[in-house]
Amino acid sequence: MHSALHVLGLLLAASPGTPLEARLDAGLAEHPPGADRASFASALLVGAPYRLSPLGEGSGIDPDPRFRLDAFDCVTFVETAMALGSARTVAEAARLLDDVRYDGPTDYQHRNHYVESQWVPALVRKGWLEPVTRSIGGDGAVRTVKRLDTATWDLARRSGHVVSGLEPGNVPVGEFALDVLPLDRLGAIAPRIPDGTVLLVVREDRASRPSRVTHMGLVVERPDGSRAFRHASDVPGVERVRDEPLEAFARRAARQRWKIVGVSLYRMNERSPLPTNSR
């Protein structure tokens, strides 16, 4: 019964004929695929409520639906925007989202859970994303590395900072690098960040944390030419998808207790044709 209810929720969340779906279907093909289309589509999601981990596999460990347009966290918001950016219809986006979220079969064990070590490498390898921190930030960009080994994972487990339910063979191990633009340089290079660029928030390394990336969103161009950070915000009082002026985001980020050292930037590409192992 529990699984059946979640299947029903999936059908309702992405049911054909909803006003949002109709607006997306009417407008997606009018915009070039990739970042431009994703920027258009994600603007229609502004105001949607924040919900932690709103997507799953529809059954099993995480029975939440595999696609929905009514609630997001920061990762699922970016993933959905990417899928919509390469889709001509919402139905296509639902199929493409599987290719964004999974590196292999659409099951919990093959989901891209950890950003630096799974999500970024898989999406760059598949062609969804392309690193642009250095091309935009120039000499200001610095290379950072997160090392994951047995000792790291043991400490992370003891600290309660791991994704539960992952089999040992599906836990990433190795060194994972990101190019990072220091937070205090973000304002200076903001005008050079193209509309629809994916921005990852990178914090200081902590031994007990298997990921330094704790937030993400899209940089979008506003009508006056300035930039905003479009993201699913979990800030108390503004728990929704919103456009936050990039300079305001940078000021707020600079006050965090777990220091944010900078951001990593990625160009969003079109991903086609549709993957053959889609739903």
Image (cartoon, rainbow, N blue to C red):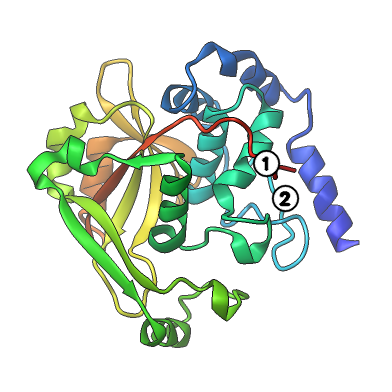
Mark-to-mark CA distance, 2 and 1 = 7 Å
Near mark 2 (Cα within 10 A), the count class, few <14, some 14-19 or many ≥20, is many
The residue under label 2 is 65
Horizontal side of 57 relative to 174 (left or right) equals right
Q: Position of residue 138 (x, y in %)?
A: 12, 40
Q: Nearer the viewer, residue 25 or 179?
A: 179
Say if residue 276 shows up in the picture.
yes
Image quarter in which the C terminus is found: top right
Q: Are marks 2 and 1 in contact (CB under 8 Å)?
A: yes
The residue under label 1 is 68
- Above or below for 209 versus 6: below
Report the residue at 49% width, 50% height from top: 75
Report the residue at 45% width, 88% height from top: 158
Identify the image quadrant of residue 273.
Answer: top right
Horizontal side of 139 relative to 22 (left or right) equals left
Image quarter in which the N terminus is found: bottom right
